[in-house]
Image: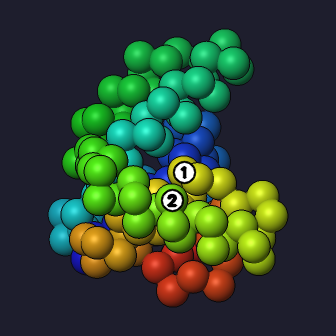
């Protein structure tokens, strides 16, 4: 099975929380294929830097434990259209969340998260 690990799940993993342990189990399962969006790297590095953490450790953890998917022009266009539709229903739904959902649909993956914005989407698996 394919999984995309979103920023919420990476934060839990990096902090070593109970939810992070669930992420670790999935990452360590050789039957799972793990992906991250390149934008997720920027989100995590920014968050770690603001908390005065080690950005190299965070970056290396993501790159070593997942295949990094790029935002292609096609994904960007579809995510933009999807984002506009969803924002009519969920006012604070982020563009990064739209990008991850579109990527999940493109590669037939589940999103590992605890971000409430993903509630109700069949692609989401909550920690």
The image shows residue 64, relative to residue 121, as above or below, that is above
Quarter of the rendering containing residue 85 = bottom right
Q: Is residue 64 visible?
A: yes
- Of tags 1 and 2, which is closer to the observer? 2
Q: Is residue 75 left or right of residue 10?
A: left
Q: Residue at x 22, y 63 (%)?
A: 33
Asked which secondary structure carries label 1, the reply is helix
The residue identified by callout 1 is 96
Q: Where in the figure is residue 106, as x and y percent of width and height?
A: 28, 72
Asked which secondary structure carries label 2, the reply is helix
The residue identified by callout 2 is 80
The image shows residue 40, relative to residue 74, as above or below, that is above
Is residue 92 or residue 120 the one in the foreground?
Answer: 92
Give the alpha-carbon distance from disc 1 to disc 2, as whole Å.
10 Å
Within 10 Å of the Cα at label 2, are there few (<14), some (14-19), or many (20+) other Cα atoms?
some
Quarter of the rendering containing residue 92 = bottom right
Q: Residue at x 46, y 62 (%)?
A: 79
The image shows residue 110, relative to residue 79, as above or below, that is below
């Amino acid at each position: 099975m394919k999984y995309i690990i979103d920023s919420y799940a990476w934060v839990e993993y990096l902090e070593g929380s109970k939810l992070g342990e669930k992420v670790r189990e999935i990452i360590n399962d050789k039957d799972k294929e793990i992906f991250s969006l390149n934008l997720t790297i920027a989100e995590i590095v920014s968050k770690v830097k603001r908390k005065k953490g080690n950005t190299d450790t965070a970056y290396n953890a993501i790159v070593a434990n997942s295949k990094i998917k790029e935002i292609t022009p096609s994904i960007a266009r579809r995510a933009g259209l999807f984002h506009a539709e969803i924002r009519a229903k969920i006012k604070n739904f982020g563009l990064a969340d739209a990008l991850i959902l579109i990527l999940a649909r493109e590669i037939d993956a589940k999103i590992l998260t605890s971000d409430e914005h993903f509630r109700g989407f069949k692609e989401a698996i909550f920690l």
